Image (tube, rainbow, N blue to C red):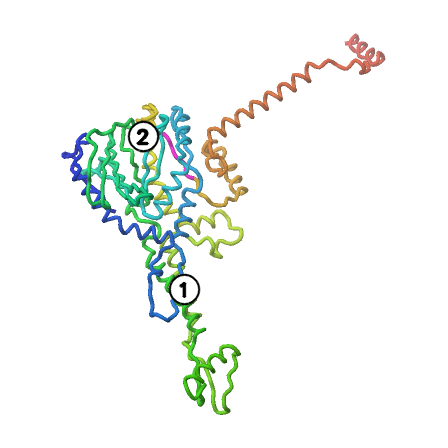
Amino acid sequence: MYRFTYPAEGYDETALDKKIILNLIMKHYGLVQNKYKCRDYYEGRHDILSRNRKEGLPDVKIVCNHAKDITDTATGYFMGNPITYSNTDDTDITPLLSAFDDADVDDVDADNAQDMSIYGLAYEYVYAKKDEPKPALKNLSPLHTFIVVDDSIEENELFGVYYWPKKDDAKDIKTWVATICTEHYNWTLNIDNDVKAANTLTETPEPHNFGGIQIIEYLNNKEGMGDFEQQIPLIDAYNTLMSDRVTDKEQFIDAILVLYGSILGDDEEETKEAQEELRKKKLLELPADAKAEYLTRAMDEAGAETLRKAIKEDIYNFSHVPNLTDENFAGNTSGVAMEYKLLGLEMITKVKERYYKRGLQKRIILFCNFLNMQAMAQDASSVVPTFARSLPKNLQELANTLYNMKDLVSMKTLLKQIPFVEDPDAEIEELTKQKEEAIKQQQEMFAMGYNNPPDEDEPEEPEEEKEPKEAAGDKE
């Protein structure tokens, strides 16, 4: 993964150099071209569609979009369920969670996860709404966004750049605008002629109240590589094989008819008439010593099918994303067996999760700075995000496991493992209320039974039975 660097000693966020910013944009614009291929493959525009064969010959072009299947499976497994947050100290994070809900962080997280799988990295922009002072989020295209770091071993982030086309479809005008986000300011750069010339850089930067760079980077892995990027040659091979198999079927239908010991006509005109009659009636009369047969190429369907399965298996094996429609996932499978089959996917998802947590800490700091939650901003690591895998759960097996661990693990930790519990803290509070109400009802019922006087219609104890008791007492 290429990192854009700039010397820290020559950097001043209050006086950016327009030429340097333009050079960085031009360099990114050139390096990112390979990512466009990843986008095309996810959207179904594969190289097989540009293949051209000789004119007049069948040329079937089939796109088997394994790239989209890999990305959708990996993204759904990683971010199919919303992220939940808890706090390890006594600070109230309710304002932060409310701000997250207002900013629709779940939608942005899903978009980020998809970009990570396709391009190998994702970006988001934290900004303040114009109409109301609330923080908001926007997913940015990795094709037009990058982060610049200093040249130290720590690679401290200096600023982020996002450039995008500004179009007027009514007039067919297309210009480019770049936003440069530093720790305390935002700059605007206008560009014309498809990122080739810069016009103006705002002389006065616009300050912001986030206390950090508003563009956040999320890596898919250390190399910044997409989930199917290395499998593109295998996907091309699969597309070629399937296209050629169908093309061979087309050529088989248009096979050449060979006559031995006979001809269809004495001249060209009779031959054409005989060809037309043969197409219509599907009947051919030949002399006794003549024969006819189609000239075809023998197709090894068994070998082609074996090759198809091998290529498809390699695509999913090397991407570590399983084919969930495979027969190995059919039927009722225990949780341990399912986890073993998803071991490769779980490993790459753990890497995604580790890098995504780094970005989430930056997001929390920016939101807390904007909301004046300074204590929380200084210790953003106390807010713990919890990722839930999006897979069918064996609730009976899970319930037995949680019950056996109830004396070893806290209630909050156990509730985090239940897929349909989104907020463990709220669930614990609700459970406490239910227990208190149940105890109160029991106390009220007990009090009513204790204070209730005996019924007047109930017969009293007979006198004959009382006297022996009194007599017994006198003898004592």
Q: Is residue 180 left or right of residue 113?
A: left
Residue 28 seen in the current view? no
Q: Position of residue 56 (x, y in %)?
A: 37, 71
User: Pointer 2: residues within 10 angstroms few (<14), some, or many (20+)?
Assistant: many
According to the image, label 1 marks what residue? Answer: 242
Comparing 383 with 253, the one in front is 253
Q: Is residue 289 left or right of residue 360?
A: right
Task: Identify the residue at image location x=33%, y=61%.
Answer: 50
- Point out the frontmost of discs 2 and 1: 1
Q: Which residues are magenta?
A: 379-387
Does dot 1 land on a helix, a strand or a loop?
helix
Looking at the image, which residue sits at the far top?
Answer: 474
Q: Which quarter of the picture shows residue 299? A: bottom left
Q: Which quarter of the picture shows residue 365? A: top left
Q: Is residue 383 magenta?
A: yes
Q: Which quarter of the picture shows residue 351? A: top left
Q: Position of residue 9 (x, y in %)?
A: 14, 34
Q: Is residue 114 left or right of residue 461?
A: left
Q: Is residue 316 magenta?
A: no
Looking at the image, which residue sits at the far right?
Answer: 464
Marked residue nearer the N-terminal end (2 or 1): 1
Comparing 151 with 415, the one in front is 151
According to the image, label 2 marks what residue? Answer: 366
Does dot 2 land on a helix, a strand or a loop?
helix
**As shown in the figure, which amino acid type bears the numbered disc 1?**
Met
Looking at the image, which residue sits at the far bottom?
Answer: 289
Q: Position of residue 126 (x, y in %)?
A: 32, 33
**As shown in the figure, which amino acid type bears the numbered disc 2?**
Leu
